[in-house]
């Protein structure tokens, strides 16, 4: 039996901005749906109000996705077929701790550099954990307050 395909979906207040952060943090690529959007608009299958511009590209309003740069993707839609995170805007703000989070791992001995790089992208440090042989990591928050760990 083959493994199932999946993507992680993250609720956001500004999908494109958070996709930019996570693409930089994970060294992923932001998907470019502008060719697909152009075809859908030209065919009358997408209303103009469903589209906005971000980073010089037309994007779906309220949605953005990132994908691993080595994974396959559909060149006509820009949609990745591998490791992928979709960000979607929701009306309500984040109010409690995440029930699922991402761990970003550094090279051996590189935790300080990783944390500094993530902070330069807009993350904030919350708490440091040093459990000796069990590990050393930082609990951090992305620009919208979603918790993640840098280890």
Image (cartoon, rainbow, N blue to C red):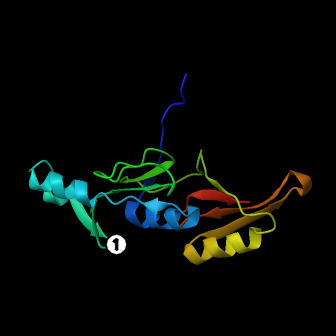
Rendering coords of residue 17 (x, y %): 42, 67
Position of 111 with respect to 148 (left or right) is right
Question: Does 82 appear above or below 133?
Answer: above
What residue lies at 67% left-to-right and 76% top-to-bottom?
Answer: 116
Q: In the rendered view, does 10 fall on the left or right side of 105?
A: left
The answer to which quarter of the image holds residue 26 is: bottom right
Quarter where residue 112 is shown: bottom right
Point out the image quarter for the N terminus. Answer: top right
Q: Position of residue 27 (x, y in %)?
A: 55, 64
Front one among 90 and 136 = 136
Q: Residue furthest right?
A: 132
Q: Is residue 105 left or right of residue 10?
A: right
In the rendered view, would you say 118 is above or below 11? below
The quadrant of the picture occupied by the C terminus is bottom right
* Disc 1: which residue: 55
Residue 107 pos. (x, y %):
74, 64
Considering the numbered disc 1 on the image, is that residue within a helix, a strand or a loop? loop
Percent from the top left, x then y, of residue 144?
Answer: 50, 64
Q: Residue at x 56, y 52 (%)?
A: 96
How many residues crowd around disc 1 within 10 Å: few (fewer than 14), some, or many (20 or more)? few
**Looking at this view, is 48 or 109 the one in front?**
109
Residue 7 in sight from this viewpoint: yes
Please identify the quarter of the rendering in which residue 16 is found: bottom left
Res. 14 in view: no
Q: Residue at x 48, y 38 (%)?
A: 6
Count the labels in the image. Answer: 1
């Amino acid at each position: 039996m083959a493994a199932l395909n999946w993507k992680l979906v993250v609720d956001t207040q500004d999908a494109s901005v958070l996709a930019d952060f996570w693409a930089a943090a994970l060294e992923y690529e932001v998907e470019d749906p502008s060719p697909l959007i152009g075809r859908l608009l030209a065919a009358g299958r997408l209303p103009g109000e469903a589209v906005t511009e971000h980073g010089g590209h037309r994007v779906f309003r309220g949605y953005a996705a990132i994908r691993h740069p080595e994974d396959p993707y559909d060149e006509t839609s820009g949609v990745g077929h591998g490791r992928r995170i979709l960000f979607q805007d929701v009306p309500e703000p984040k109010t409690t701790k995440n029930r699922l989070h991402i761990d970003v791992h550094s090279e051996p001995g590189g935790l300080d550099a990783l944390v500094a790089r993530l902070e330069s992208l807009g993350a904030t440090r919350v708490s440091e954990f040093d459990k000796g042989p069990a590990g050393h990591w930082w609990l951090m928050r992305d620009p919208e307050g979603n918790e993640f760990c840098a280890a």
